[in-house]
Amino acid sequence: MSKYETPEYEVIMKDNEYEIRKYTDFFIVEYENEMDPEINKGFGSLFNYISSDNKEKEKISMTTPVIQEVTSANKKMAFVVPGKFGQQIPEPNNPNLKIKKFDEGLFAVIQYSGFSNKSKELQREKKLESWISDKGYQRKSNYMLAFYNAPFTLPMLRRNEIWVRVIKI
């Protein structure tokens, strides 16, 4: 298991690489920049934030996963805030970073290893969409990519996931 803090959840259903999870509320710091729709500066901006580029000049522990969301307009990237901060989260200096609450709820998840790429992600999204429907759930959000490993982690040891908020129908 990871040496980094990760959001708490309960597994409601498990079926091979698929899960339905119930996440509790947690906070994220999210990078969104209209001038950088492919989030090329996302990870660097978030890394600078946790390395003390915040109004309190506080170093913040790394957490997992790093979350990416693709919206109709652009992409977003987020860092999970360590639970020790509660709601007293250091304010970002970077105007492209915002503190947001990630609301509790049910999420359908598919796990996979290796390096992620657009083709692999689209294939997994289609499989997840079909599984969600078969299990009597309905998608209620954009798909989110969740990455748990450092860039130098060997492909077969990598943990990647696709999340989507769902409701039971």
Image (cartoon, grey):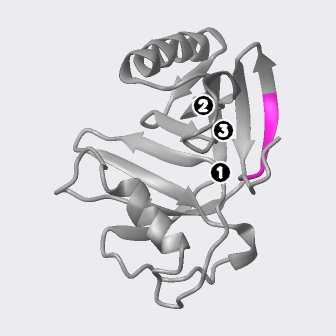
Q: Secondary structure at mark 1?
A: loop
Residue neighbourhood size for the residue with mark 2, other residues' Cα within 10 Å, grouped as few (<14), some (14–19), many (≥20): many
Q: How many marks?
A: 3
| Residue 112 appears in the picture as rendered | no
Q: Nearer the viewer, mark 2 or mark 3?
A: 2
Magenta stretch: includes residue 9: yes
The amino acid type of the residue labelled 3 equals Leu
Do the CB atoms of the residues marked 1 and 3 lie less than 8 Å apart?
no
Which of the 4 image quadrants contains residue 87?
bottom right
Where is residue 58 drawn, in percent x and y? 59, 85
Q: Earlier in the sequence, mark 1 or mark 2?
A: 1
Relative to residue 118, is residue 8 depicted above or below?
below
Q: Which residues are magenta?
A: 7-12
Where is residue 57 drawn, in percent x and y? 53, 88
Residue designated by label 3:
106
Task: Report the front residue among 162 and 9.
Answer: 162
Using residue 111 as the reference point, say whether residue 95 is left or right of it.
Answer: left
How far, Cα to Cα, is label 1 from label 2?
A: 11 Å
Q: Quadrant of the C terminus?
A: top right
Task: Report the front residue among 27 and 58.
Answer: 58
Residue neighbourhood size for the residue with mark 1, other residues' Cα within 10 Å, grouped as few (<14), some (14–19), many (≥20): many
Q: Residue at x 41, y 18 (%)?
A: 122
The amino acid type of the residue labelled 1 equals Thr
Residue designated by label 1:
64
How far, Cα to Cα, is label 2 from label 3?
A: 18 Å
Q: Secondary structure at mark 2?
A: strand
The amino acid type of the residue labelled 2 equals Asn
